[in-house]
Image (cartoon, rainbow, N blue to C red):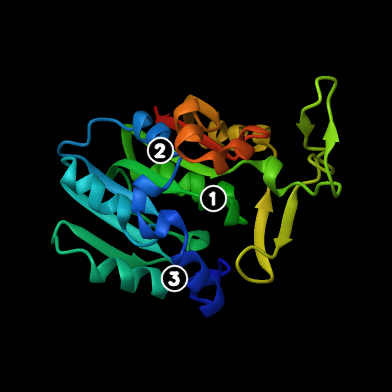
Amino acid sequence: MTQNIYDDPEFFEGYSRLGRSVHGLEGAPEWPSLRALLPDLTGKRVVDLGCGFGWFCRWARENGAAQVLGLDVSENMLARARAVTADEAVSYERADLEHLELPDASFDLAYSSLVLHYITDLPRLLATVHRALVPGGQFTFSMEHPILMAPMHPGWTMDGQGRKTWPVDSYQMEGPRVTNWLAEGVVKQHRTIGTTLNLLIRSGFAITHVEEWGPTDAQVAASPMLAEERERPMFLLVSARRG
């Protein structure tokens, strides 16, 4: 079963204070880039893999989706999502994405934000998503950039122009990484970019966009703390289509 860290009280309390938890999609700096990858949702059937508080589910309905299904393993997340959603066309279900089953050809868009780096059996999940999409259906997702999960030497190094660099170790060594982000013992699955993209291709997807996300000048000006995120990519954004 997927590690259900979001039902850990300490973790959930910390996560609930994050900007993206308080302000929703607009509190996620990568959201404008993700939004730009999405198709016209008018009349579309949408599934959100790891829906959290349901921010995207509600946004999809507000932007024309006919039906939206939000899936999450966390009861805490689902309880919050249900409490703030008053729309019969949006439904939430508890699901372990490691063992997910979805009806064939039942969705036009599958969406996932910062979830896939927790999944151990990613090939199985990708195959499930592929089957659940109609021909031509789209899968758009974000995940932590794998550089963030590769161990790093303590401290910075400098390049020839006096800029900080991130000395990454063990990037090619894939597998679980244990971090202490918001709570101790959070397990994430490290894969190279090549592995992730090739798994999509083997699952039958045609990749249409890949972005190693970083903040824009305007975002850094509005929130100077984001300047550090230009030192290395923070997120990997991908969009793919079922043939």
Above/below status of 103 relative to 107? below
Mark 3 lies on residue? 74
Q: Residues within 10 Å of mark 1 (few under 14, many from 20)?
A: many
Residue 109 in percent (x, y) is at 32, 40
Mark 1: which amino acid? Leu
Question: Does residue 4 appear in the picture of this structure?
Answer: no
Residue at position x 19%, y 50% in the image: 67
Mark 2: which amino acid? Phe
Tell me the number on the disc at residue 139.
2
Q: Earlier in the sequence, mark 3 or mark 2?
A: 3
Real-space CA distance between mark 1 and mark 2, rounded to the nearest whole angstrom: 12 Å
Q: Quick one: which residue is furthest to the top in this view?
A: 161
Mark 3: which amino acid? Ser
Task: Name the element at disc 3.
Answer: loop
Mark 1 lies on residue? 116
Task: Name the element at disc 1.
Answer: helix
Residue at position x 68%, y 34% in the image: 231
Q: Nearer the viewer, mark 3 or mark 2?
A: 3
Q: Quadrant of residue 227 in the image?
A: top right
